[in-house]
Image (cartoon, rainbow, N blue to C red):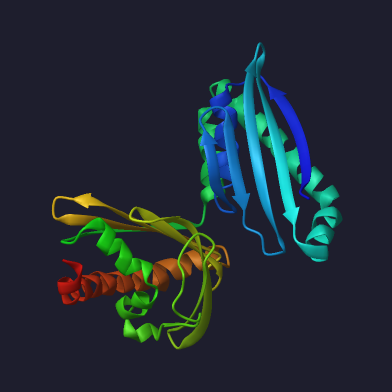
Amino acid sequence: MAACYDCSKTAASPCAALCAAPKHLATLAVTSKAIEPNRLLRLRAEMKLPGRAWLQFEVAEDGSGSTIRQTAIFDPVGVFGAAYWYGLFPLHSSLFAGMLRRIEQVASLASAGWDFLLRTALRWTRSGLHRLERSQALPFPVDEVFDFFADPSNLEVITPPWLRFRILTQQPIAMGEGTLIDYRLSLHGLPLRWRTEIVVWEPGRRFVDRQLSGPYRFWEHTHTFEQHEDGTLMRDVVVYRLPLGRLGALANRAIVESDLQRIFDHRREAIGRQLDQAAPSLT
């Protein structure tokens, strides 16, 4: 049975201002599962212990402003999951109550015209994040291009050989939301292990993989596919954060950013080449 923590707060501020704060504050730790603008935001947490967790914000306007209701739900699995929830319940109670107070403060500043403070707070929240975007037009139908990427073995084919990239998970791998894939690679002579989870899976449209363990503090790669006059427009958006704070930021400028550019340059050429070779079976 799921355990629950529930509390609410009233503030003289619009619904939209109250909804914006938790949405942005939570982007690094959770996956959005439901959004109803100005009314509801439900987030699924990333759990490394047995169980599933959600954090939900509901907002309702009243005569004096808005009331936000925050609900944390944890569905434990086994003894360790239950021990985790009840052992940390006092800490969670304080943490969530403090979160509501901060939301109220930020929303009050925004409603009073101090929007620049809100924007500054959001910049602080997102500090350290880096973003890489690539797009590529491919002369094949969307479903067939998506199917190429739905086969994890093709990832080895399009990854640069100097990474010595290998999939450790037994294949074939059934792809879908919740699929876990383990990899091994070597970067600048350093052997690394990487585990990712497919957190979004929409066949023919998009999928998202997120690092669970590996060299990054945070890594999320969104792949989208859409119809294009030449066939398919494929987009890659990678959002990542390195460990070690400012040292990580220096490493990104000195090494990591250029490495990623090289990797995606190679991918671009390899994807086109592999699809061209597979053209008889794709057309």
Q: Nearer the viewer, residue 198 or 243?
A: 198
Report if residue 279 is visible in the image.
yes
Report if residue 220 is visible in the image.
no
**Residue 86: x and y, percent?**
85, 54
Q: Nearer the viewer, residue 44 or 211?
A: 44
Check the image and report above or below for 32 versus 135: above
Q: Quick check: 224 left or right of 212?
A: left
Q: Quick check: 83 left or right of 140?
A: right
Q: Nearer the viewer, residue 58 or 64?
A: 58
Q: How many labels sit on residues?
A: 0
Determine the residue positioned at 26% across, 63% down.
145
Check the image and report above or below for 202 versus 198: above
**Residue 275: x and y, percent?**
21, 71
Check the image and report above or below for 117 versus 12: below
Determine the residue positioned at 36% across, 73% down.
259
Give residue 77's quadrant in the image.
bottom right
Q: Quick check: 202 left or right of 22?
A: left
Determine the residue positioned at 83% across, 50% down.
89
**Residue 180: x and y, percent?**
53, 69
Check the image and report above or below for 255 versus 64: below
Q: The C terminus appears in which quarter of the rendering?
A: bottom left
In the displayed orientation, state which residue is furthest to the bottom. 189
**Residue 93: x and y, percent?**
80, 44
Give residue 264's quadrant in the image.
bottom left
Q: Quick check: 85 left or right of 139?
A: right
Q: Nearer the viewer, residue 135 or 179?
A: 179
